[in-house]
Amino acid sequence: MPFEPSITLAVPADYSFAANLGYLARSPKECLHRIQGDRLYKALPLRGTPVVEIGAAAGGGLRAAFASDRGIPSDDVREEAAAYIHEWLDLDTELDPFYRLAAEDPILAAAASTHKGLRLIGIPDLFEAMAWGILGQQINLAFAYTLKARLVEAYGSQVTVGGDAYWTFPEPHLIAGLEVKDLMPLKLTVKKCEYLIHVAELIAAGALSKGMLMELGARDAEKALVRIRGIGPWTANYVMMRCLRMKDAFPIDDVGLNHALRHVTGRDAKPSREEILRLSAGWRGWESYATFYLWRLLY
């Protein structure tokens, strides 16, 4: 299947497409993008649902090509696609300050050196980010991916290119119109069904939006999110990291972060909250990237 025409995206000097592709390939159960060789494929949740093939450009940067059997995208769609990819792949963040900080930090030095060029891959859509946080509560990552795939295949949108199916995440207004009994066949708990529907209702009604949250600082955004039923501090900070791009978001009670800190420090026991605060004192303003890089050590 040919992918033409294409756009070229500039990337930071320290960007590594291979490192980011490695992160995106961490689960074979991922349903919203696919990787074949050194190429990344995704249906973008934009007008017309363009399907793109992303790879390293010959002259530097990234080349994003559009599936030819979806029609030639307009200039507006190309611009929207470029903006989406920039946000999704975190191409606009200047990481030099983080790398300088990490080089002097005994906890972060190895992770930053090993995975240099990795970006904090995002979830641009607020409902998808919140839903993913809810789905992942109190279960292992593999099962969370299974639940996401069930939700996407039941209520998401599908396009087919070259015989391959590509999915986009369900729209909040669709989930807002459901009842708990509609989601139960997906093997979600009753509480998770209730939480998903409630969040979808808030977003569909305009009572909650990404723009609203981004106008707040990290602490106020966290307070606003945890007031929502089903959203605790971990989920709030996860959304702040992956969707709102708040560098000082810090899911301090995250199990993966705890495991990574045990691994780096050689401890047998889980570090206490006070110990984590002490170990992370030098990360101020970059807590989200520090957490993301430490998570990467676990794969």
Image (cartoon, rainbow, N blue to C red):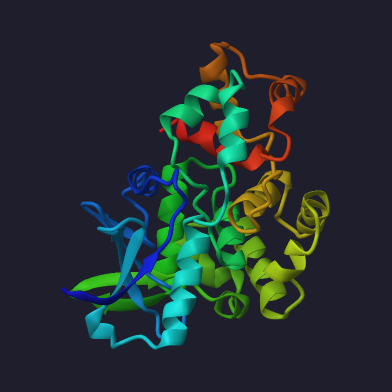
Q: Please tell me which residue lies in front, 45 or 204.
A: 45
Please state the horizontal and vertical placement of residue 195, each as a whole percent of the image.
66, 61
Q: Please tell me which residue lies in front, 119 or 127.
A: 119
Decide: is 162 above or below 73: above
Q: Please tell me which residue lies in front, 100 or 282.
A: 100
Q: Please tell me which residue lies in front, 15 or 175.
A: 15
Please state the horizontal and vertical placement of residue 197, each as a whole percent of the image.
63, 69
162 sits to left or right of 151: left
Quarter of the image containing the C terminus?
A: top left
Q: Picture quarter containing residue 14?
A: top left
The reply to whether residue 209 is in sight is no
Q: Residue at x 65, y 58 (%)?
A: 244
Decide: is 297 above or below 139: above
57 sits to left or right of 48: left
Quarter of the image containing the N terminus?
A: bottom left
31 sits to left or right of 282: left
Please state the horizontal and vertical placement of residue 121, each as a whole percent of the image.
49, 52
Decide: is 96 above or below 294: below
Please state the horizontal and vertical placement of residue 133, each as a whole percent of the image.
59, 53
Total labels drawn: 0
Q: Residue at x 21, y 52 (%)?
A: 37
The reply to whether residue 262 is in sight is yes
